[in-house]
């Protein structure tokens, strides 16, 4: 294949209505201004801040998103289970859940220019609670299976522990062309291209309420930390934070050439 420059725009965890409205207003603008070939979004908190349902997924696709990844809140809305099977090419869940779970953790997306991108969703295990297969082994299996013939491999690695995320980035270096971390909703400042040509960031951050505690109204969270008692969490409102990364690739060399963070606050919609 002759040298082809390719760009992927990835936007961090979408939180509630604020996040969905933000993407509805900004995805098409960013796609054009950043000359993005593929737009991937983590949507696992798009439905009321916990889970995703078919209506919210449809809203993100209507905004111009090509592929939705998820994480540990994928099962938050029961209606998403049949949707995962019906739309396996467009929305994926962590691949290292037990065999038989609805949906899949890998989809191969093909651009108008014929570039085949394997988008993989994996979940870390440290501090995550769920019973999961090893994400490192799952990645190796996918590279020899569904992702084998892809021109580029893009991984959303959903996890809590920074050490586990960094370790996975090095494990995949030179075999995946991008590893982006999600889950904490706090953007890290360690974006780089690893020695083997893999674009890496520990956490992309979130797209959701700016004046919040990782997307949730501030007062109940503060109360819970003060008292140790359960409180009702609601997604916050107001101004919107957009976090993401723009990654550029040399398809012929099968490596990333640059990664840049996006971090911008937008006034409240409506």
Image (tube, helix red, strand yellow):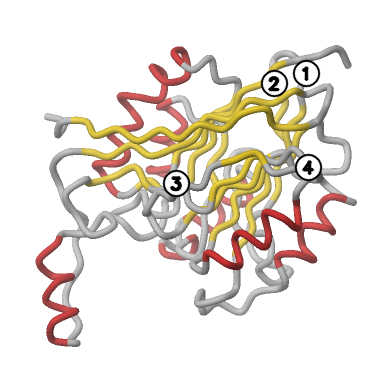
Tell me how far mark 1 sits from mark 3, CA to CA: 33 Å
Q: Are marks 3 and 4 in contact (CB under 8 Å)?
A: no
Image location (x, y in percent) of residue 91: 57, 44
Q: Would you say 164 lies left or right of 210 here?
A: right
Give x and y (percent) for residue 78: 45, 63
Residue assigned mark 3: 189
Residue 37's label in the rendered image is none
The residue to which callout 4 is attached is: 196
The Cα atoms of the two marked residues, 1 and 2, are separated by 5 Å
Q: Is 265 placed left or right of 237 in the picture? A: right
Residue mark closest to the camera, 4 vs 1: 4
The residue that mark 1 highlights is 114
Q: Under tag 3, what secondary structure?
A: loop
Label whose residue precedes the other's in the sequence (2 or 3): 2
Q: What is the distance, in whole Å, between disc 3 and disc 4 at their CAs?
A: 20 Å
**Contact? badges 1 and 2 (CB < 8 Å):** yes
According to the picture, the residue beneath numbered tag 2 turns out to be 111
Kindly report which numbered mark, 1 or 3, lies closer to the viewer in this rendering.
3
Q: Secondary structure at mark 4?
A: loop
Q: Is 96 above or below relative to 37?
A: below
Q: Which of the 4 image quarters holds residue 249?
A: top right
Q: State the residue in front, 18 or 239.
A: 239
Q: Of marks 2 and 4, which one's residue comes earlier in the chain?
A: 2
């Amino acid at each position: 294949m002759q040298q082809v420059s390719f760009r992927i725009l990835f936007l961090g965890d979408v939180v509630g209505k604020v996040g969905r409205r933000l993407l509805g207003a900004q995805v098409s603008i960013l796609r054009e201004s950043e000359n993005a070939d593929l737009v991937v979004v983590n949507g696992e908190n798009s439905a009321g801040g916990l889970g995703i349902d078919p209506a919210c997924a449809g809203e993100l696709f209507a905004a111009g998103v090509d592929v939705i990844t998820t994480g540990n809140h994928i099962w938050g809305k029961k209606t998403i289970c049949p949707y995962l099977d019906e739309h396996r090419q467009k929305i994926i869940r962590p691949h290292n859940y037990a065999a038989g779970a609805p949906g899949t953790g890998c989809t191969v997306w093909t651009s108008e220019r014929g570039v085949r991108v394997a988008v993989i969703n994996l979940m870390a295990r440290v501090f995550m609670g769920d019973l999961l297969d090893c994400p490192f082994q799952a990645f190796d299996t996918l590279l020899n299976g569904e992702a084998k013939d892809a021109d580029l491999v893009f991984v959303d690695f959903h996890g809590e522990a920074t050490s586990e995320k960094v370790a996975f980035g090095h494990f995949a270096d030179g075999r995946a062309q991008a590893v982006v971390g999600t889950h904490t909703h706090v953007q890290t400042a360690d974006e780089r291209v690893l020695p083997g040509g893999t674009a890496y960031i520990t956490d992309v951050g979130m797209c959701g309420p700016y004046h919040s505690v990782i997307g949730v109204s501030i007062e109940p969270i503060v109360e819970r930390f003060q008292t140790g008692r359960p409180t009702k969490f609601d997604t916050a409102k107001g101004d919107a934070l957009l976090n993401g990364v723009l990654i550029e690739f040399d398809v012929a060399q099968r490596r990333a050439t640059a990664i840049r963070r996006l971090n911008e606050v937008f006034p409240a919609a409506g």
